[in-house]
Image (cartoon, grey):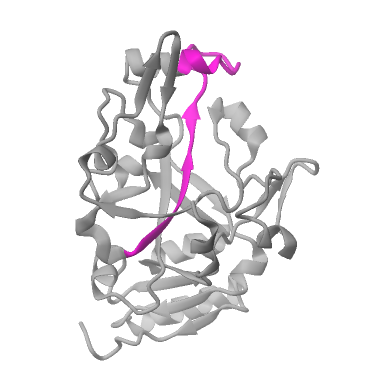
Amino acid sequence: MDNTVFDQIDRLYHYTTVESLVLILKNRTLRLNPLDKMDDLQEAQSLSRQNYGQFVYVSSWTDMKEESIPMWKMYSSMTSGVRISLPPCPFQIFDLSQNCFRDPTLQERASMYTTTALYPVVNIYDDLQRNVSTATNIGQQLHKVEYTDDVEKLCPKLEKIDGDKAYIALDMMGIYKSSIWSFQSEYRYLIRSIPCNLLGGNAMQNWSIVVNTMIQMGGVESNRQYIDLRLAGNMLDQMVITTSPAISPSNKIIVEALLSQFCPKARIESSALEGKVR
């Protein structure tokens, strides 16, 4: 993807509920859910017997600075909702040498879209224990959704077999949506995580066995329900919370208390639509 696309983005926005904000701030994590659980039923479709959407995990954001009434109503709540604003890729990285998560340096963040260095946002060692393959560097999990009416992109052919070699183009999933959703102007954090041991035990299998099992038999089930990415403290300090247009007094108090306890440097703003919509 063209790096200049991201050079133009200083913030992304996520509509959610006060209840979800509690979990995000308390745990300092952002949850990515499987593609086959999204509201767009087309997203997990492919020309395959295998459900590949369950291996693609996403969190949906938008680059629209102006508030969206449809987004408030579809993904939040007019009386108990918030819109989270953060710089792009606000995640901690897993330091392989120290075997721990840490905030990326300014230099690492500046090079996140071009670096070849390994700055994973997941604990690779934990994934080995889970028998899953999850490889993603900071910056590489952010994608701009392409809206299209091209059936081959909306319901792609993912599987390719060439003699004794088999390949699954999982990178075709999660980046295209029907043009009817274009009002969202969506960016998403996307991670693909595939089980790598289909025979039991705790040893990583040959990748060709995994691929051929999926293609020939289908029915392979994911062994994780979600992926949580850790939020960097220096990014949380830059968080801006916009309260929903008709937020109740009690929910506004909850939001203020949450930020005071978990994120005191963050800022709260009232909705520009306050007093204009129900």
- How far across and down, in percent of the image, does residue 34 sit? 38, 42
Residue 39 at least partly seen: no
Residue at point 28%, 68% (across, down): 71
187 up-or-down from 163: above or below: below
- How far across and down, in percent of the image, does residue 66 sit? 35, 79
256 up-or-down from 19: above or below: below
Location of the C terminus by quadrant is bottom left
Looking at the image, residue 53 sits to the left or right of residue 181; the answer is right
Report if residue 109 lies within the magenta region: no
Residue at point 55%, 35% (across, down): 134
Looking at the image, residue 41 sits to the left or right of residue 245; the answer is left
- How far across and down, in percent of the image, does residue 82 sit? 39, 73
116 up-or-down from 111: above or below: above
Of all residues shown, which one is farthest toward the right? 97
Which quadrant would residue 92 be assigned to in this image?
A: bottom right
Residue at point 48%, 11% (across, down): 199
Which quadrant would residue 69 be assigned to in this image?
A: bottom left
Residue nearest the viewer, comparing 102 with 160: 160
Looking at the image, residue 231 sits to the left or right of residue 212; the answer is right
Residue 186 at least partly seen: yes
Which quadrant would residue 164 be assigned to in this image?
A: top left
Of all residues shown, which one is farthest toward the top? 164
- How far across and down, in percent of the image, does residue 211 sit? 44, 19
Residue nearest the viewer, comparing 225 with 149: 149
Report if residue 187 lies within the magenta region: yes
Magenta part of the chain: 185-210
Residue at point 28%, 82% (across, down): 246
